[in-house]
């Protein structure tokens, strides 16, 4: 595949300024993205103009759309490459004797505590922890107030070896039948060494449930990673969507691989013991090490980070889905077979059919290798998955796809490359926004060489560390931020209002449908069709 294949659309045509303006209007409409931030000055005019255009001028829109398609998008670089050069901490891992890796006090005290969703809809959590000295208790004590634990759940314990490393005792406990939207306190461990935490269940599945997600990728365990983690915790994100590459322990040899998985577990505990992290696996989780006799992929990861995959009828913990508040979150595995007829492909085909945008309007996909990436790092690595899944992402109108892998930040416009008569990405209002947040701050450093010129599909890109938040307000609106780590501060840098792809974009069509239905009903016998009307059609 040649570079021009993805480097965007031909910039040979230079339309007059009026058409240029029209183009911005349409692009803003098609992309369904309203910038909040004055830093994106290029997009600002489009916002104002499209606002004045009037919401129902579909005809105008269609005319402009066809003019765009005919002239081939030719506005050169609509996107922004940020010139910000940040001072970074050295990209080295925090020494093991640092307090962020401190082992909790007490004999056999639970450590590396983390929680994740335990069922499809958010009424269960899986609580995991490690004890170092002996198996100890598998019990989780749960209650509605601190220190008063009315329920007890019983989990499992196991240990494993990795080369010459022997793991601690890994406890996993499913706590189910929880009430929605409730704060629970929990205690684990025995006697003086027991430890207390809490978590909050999400609201019941509801199209207008508001909810705030944090998004982190490629975290590692450096001082930059610590900055990212702290900043994300400041945002009061209720759940973390993690897009792969957790510990970077695979950069170590022999025994230290296991040691650095343990240190990372302690490193993220201040967040992960309280806010569920929705896990997806990256290439650093593969750990295929024939030289160490370790040839089963994802072993350390799978032993330590359970996922609720049976709840979504998946056959593997590496791909699954959960529903939370108003979001349907699909986790894919970039490093497991996904071509046609593989288990992952078959599962996704079925899972997409289960998505009910009337109940969970927000359809979010997580994967590790980005499908659209204009950085030299990992360029085109997501291409094979794009070929297999992109048409589904458009057909099902995925709202946003978060990926990691590239150690920089990038956001795309709504574009797709699925037309049989073209091999270039073109604006597509059914397409997701693609966001790369592989900027957690691991020891491999920044990917600071973007391709030049910036392809037309790329809206904003910057080689800095940070994390994102997605704050869902209701069924139509969500507010997105990318927050850069800047000299120890969290600086919101790229932000926009994400309009829901089902309730936003399709509202007009749905209205038409409704009117159509009314007229159909009117021609039928009155009476027996009242049910149809009351179904909210
Ligand atoms: C698990 O721990 C027990 C001691 O409690 C030990 O005998 C056994 O070898 C360990 N298993 C593995 C797979 O490391
Ligand atoms: C949804 O949230 C947005 C942003 O907060 C607000 O402007 C809009 O009115 C809300 N819509 C409904 C139906 O509540
Ligand atoms: Fe990666």
Image: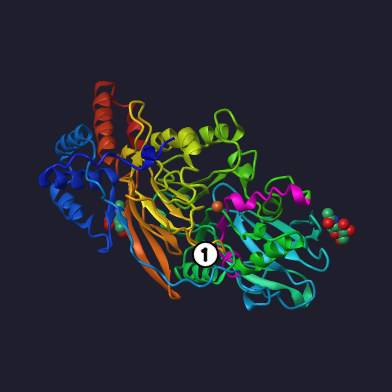
Q: Note whether residue 91 is visible.
A: yes
Let me know if residue 280 is in the magenta part: yes
Which residue is labeled 1 in the image? 441
How many labels were placed on the picture?
1
Q: Is residue 485 above or below residue 310?
A: below
Q: Is residue 382 above or below residue 213?
A: above
At a point 67% along the width and 66% down the height, the residue shown is 112
- State whether label 1 is within 8 Å of ligand 3: no
Q: Note whether residue 54 is visible.
A: no
In the structure shown, which secondary structural element does the residue marked by tag 1 occupy?
loop
Q: Considering depth in this image, is 104 or 292 the residue closer to the camera?
A: 292
User: Does residue 331 appear to the left or right of 128 in the view shown?
Assistant: left
Let me know if residue 212 is in the magenta part: no
At a point 78% along the width and 67% down the height, the residue shown is 132
Q: Considering depth in this image, is 167 or 417 the residue closer to the camera?
A: 417
Across and down, in percent, residue 407 comes to 48, 57
Across and down, in percent, residue 84 comes to 35, 66
Q: Is residue 98 above or below residue 305?
A: below
- Quadrant in the rendering for residue 266: bottom right
Q: Considering depth in this image, is 474 or 526 the residue closer to the camera?
A: 474
Across and down, in percent, residue 249 comes to 66, 60
User: Does residue 124 appear to the left or right of 18 in the view shown?
Assistant: right
Near mark 1 (Cα within 10 A), the count class, few <14, some 14-19 or many ≥20, is: many
Residue numbers of the magenta segment: 269-292
User: Does residue 212 appear to the left or right of 525 in the view shown?
Assistant: right
Q: Quadrant of the C terminus?
A: top left
Across and down, in percent, residue 218 comes to 54, 58
């Amino acid at each position: 595949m040649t570079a021009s294949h993805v480097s965007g659309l031909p910039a040979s045509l230079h339309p007059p300024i009026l058409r240029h303006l029209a183009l911005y209007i349409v692009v803003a409409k098609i992309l369904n993205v309203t910038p909040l931030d004055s830093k994106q000055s290029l997009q600002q005019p489009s916002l104002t103009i499209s606002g004045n255009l009037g919401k129902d001028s579909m005809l105008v829109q269609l005319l402009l759309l066809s003019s765009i398609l005919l002239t081939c998008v030719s506005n050169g670089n609509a996107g922004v490459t940020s010139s910000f050069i940040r001072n970074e901490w050295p990209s080295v891992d925090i020494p093991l004797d640092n307090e962020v890796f401190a082992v909790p006090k007490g004999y056999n005290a639970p450590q590396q505590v983390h929680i994740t969703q335990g069922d499809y809809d958010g009424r269960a959590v899986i609580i995991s922890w490690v004890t170092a000295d002996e198996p100890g208790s598998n019990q989780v004590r749960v209650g509605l107030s601190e220190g008063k634990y009315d329920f007890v759940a019983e989990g499992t314990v196991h240990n494993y070896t990795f080369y010459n490393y022997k793991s601690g005792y890994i406890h996993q406990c499913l706590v189910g039948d929880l009430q929605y939207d409730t704060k629970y306190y929990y205690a684990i461990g025995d006697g003086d060494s027991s430890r207390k935490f809490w978590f909050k269940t999400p609201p019941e599945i509801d199209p207008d449930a508001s909810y705030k997600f944090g998004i982190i990728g490629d975290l590692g365990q450096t001082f930059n990673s610590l900055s990212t983690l702290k900043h994300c915790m400041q945002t009061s994100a209720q759940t973390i969507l993690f897009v792969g590459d957790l510990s970077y322990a695979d950069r170590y040899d022999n025994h230290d691989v296991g040691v650095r998985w343990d240190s990372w577990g302690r490193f993220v505990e201040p967040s992960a013991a309280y806010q569920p992290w929705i896990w997806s696996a990256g290439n650093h989780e593969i750990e295929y090490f024939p030289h160490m006799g370790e040839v089963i992929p994802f072993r350390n990861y799978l032993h330590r980070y359970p996922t609720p995959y049976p709840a979504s009828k998946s056959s593997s913990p590496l791909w699954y889905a959960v529903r939370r508040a108003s979001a349907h979150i699909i986790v894919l595995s970039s490093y497991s077979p996904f071509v046609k007829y593989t288990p992952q492909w078959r599962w996704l085909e079925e899972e997409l059919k289960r998505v009910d945008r009337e109940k969970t309007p927000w359809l979010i996909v997580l994967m590790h290798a980005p499908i659209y990436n204009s950085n030299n790092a990992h360029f085109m690595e997501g291409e094979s998955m794009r070929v297999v899944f992109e048409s589904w992402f458009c057909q099902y109108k995925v709202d946003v796809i978060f990926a990691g892998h590239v150690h920089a930040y990038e956001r795309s416009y709504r574009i797709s490359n699925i037309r049989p008569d073209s091999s270039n990405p073109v604006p597509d209002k059914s397409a997701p926004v693609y966001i790369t947040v592989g900027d957690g701050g691991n020891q491999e450093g920044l990917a600071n060489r973007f391709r030049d010129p910036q392809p037309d599909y790329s809206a904003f890109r910057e080689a800095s560390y940070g994390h994102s938040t997605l704050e869902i307000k209701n069924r139509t609106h969500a507010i997105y931020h990318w927050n850069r780590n800047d000299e120890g501060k969290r600086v919101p840098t790229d932000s926009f209002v994400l309009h829901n792809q089902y309730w936003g974009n399709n509202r007009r069509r749905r209205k038409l449908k409704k009117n159509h239905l009314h007229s159909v009903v009117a021609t039928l016998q009155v009476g027996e069709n009242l049910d149809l009307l009351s179904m909210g059609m």
